Amino acid sequence: MPEWEPVIGLEIHVQLKTRTKMFCRCENVWGEEENTRTCPTCLAHPGTLPVANKTAIEWAIKLGLALGCEIAPRALFHRKHYFYPDLPKGYQISQYDVPLASGGRFVLPTAEGDREIGIVRAHLEEDAAKTIHVGGAAGRIAGAEYSLVDFNRGGTPLVEIVTEPDLRSPAEAAEFGRLLQATLRRMGVSDVNMEEGSLRVDANVSIRPAGEATLGTKTELKNMNSFRFLERGIAAEIARQEEVLRDGGEVEQETLHFDPQSGSLSALRSKEEAHDYRYFPEPDLVPIAPTEAMLERARAALPELPAARAERLERDLELPADTAKLLAFRSELGDFYEAALTGDGTDPRTLANWTTNELTARIGDADPAGTGLEPAAFARLVEMVAAKEVSASAGKEILGVLVSEGGDPAAVVESRGLGRAGGDELEAIVERAIEENAAAVEKIREGKVQAIGAIVGAVMRETKGRADGGEVQRMIRERLES
Ligand code: ADP
Ligand code: ZN
Ligand code: MG
């Protein structure tokens, strides 16, 4: 039996969060009452004409550049025809043979080095309306009693990104998706929320014997609304295809629907029903012909993207790769970290540790800038712990106070009596702990050195964590040795 190599290409839809829709001036918002953000144009009344959204075009150009694409000098809009209640015009305005952006490369840093993922194209189109199927299983049309249509979503600007079949494992596909999501979020062009559907990722999956150059027959997977599900769906499909081939069968080209409840895949439509969309150029819209000045502006407006930021943090500040990646992928965390870092004398690695471990433990997914904690106060706190002015556990307690109430770490130390235990106070506590733990002392003297933990623990309890563990151990040893 051959070893199978998975081959994966992604098709990604990104809703742009422009103020208005793609071809009309309706407000582009999510979660409002159904059918309240519509007009004759996005409801396809006869005689209405589309006008392209300039911001959407500018953002799509930026996005194409971020993906390393060429921007077409003269990109066309096409009509893509199909009949469905979510599309009152009977066609979707999309792009066909001359997309706005094509031929890109996107670098995915991995533990084994950089991987270049090819980008076939990134084109602009409009989203369809949202259909809501009522009465069937899991909101699907099969078995539904009736369907409702919400035209608020109809006409939302969408960018469709198509990758080359360059991804080689479920984990790599998910990692690519996460980097793309972080990149788009950083650019501020989309909410990129998979649960709400502003980021939708379909996966094309095939397998082939390892070493084989030609591609196997692919299937297309839909409805994975998180990266965890994307990974699971692709893994399930690879396993299914392996079994089909192992049993001497052939993989059929079809579209499969992922069920998040069961993690299983079911057929949505097969190739026999493949659409003929009868594309033709949209006569009501002029081509997109970006000027050199527009391209220059778009290039200049690109922020430092997460992959580059992770690399810079790793290289310049010598942060561990995982830490650098977390700070780069959660850019608000990275921004807070870099703002705190400007405080002089702060060790970048220690501060990064506190940011990715202690701070995230307290704020979860929230933006630290929205809490009481000031970057400078955070830096001072980490310095105080490093200088052993307060113990690590007191430092964590102080951090909790700063996050919820704001203020200065020194003031919190003062008001809550969290200063490091030392001097006569600590000596007295250590001596008492030795007296009260005669059994542990006995064991240590018999060579069971780890019994010292019981005495250290007693001191820590007594000082409420304000003492330095290393110092306490040293003091205990000194006393037992003398
Ligand atoms: P289709 O005509 O079915 O839409 P495309 O050639 O346009 O197919 O490719 C759509 C997506 O499928 C792209 O992301 C591409 O990388 C991916 N893809 C194409 N062929 C394969 C294959 N054999 N295995 C896995 N993915 C593939
Ligand atoms: Zn409208
Ligand atoms: Mg296609």
Image (tube, helix red, strand yellow):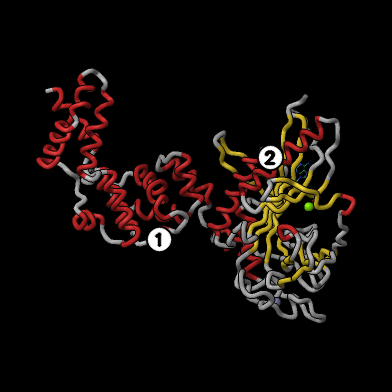
Residue at the outermost top position? 446
Where residue 288 sits, quadrant-wise, is bottom right
* SS state under label 1: helix
The residue singled out by tag 2 in the image is 235
Rendering coords of residue 467 (x, y %): 21, 41
Q: Amino acid at mark 2?
A: Ala
Q: Nearer the viewer, residue 370 or 190?
A: 370
Whether residue 297 appears in this view of the structure is: yes
The residue that mark 1 highlights is: 369
Percent from the top left, x then y, of residue 146? 79, 68
Residue drawn where x is 20% and y is 20% of the image: 445
Q: At 72% from the left edge and 70% from the top edge, which residue is drawn?
A: 154
Q: Residue furthest left?
A: 424
- Image-quadrant location for residue 264: top right
Amino acid bearing label 1: Ala
SS category of the residue bearing label 2: helix
Instruction: Name the residue at 66% across, 65% down.
Output: 291
Query: Is residue 345 visible in the rendered structure shown here?
Result: no
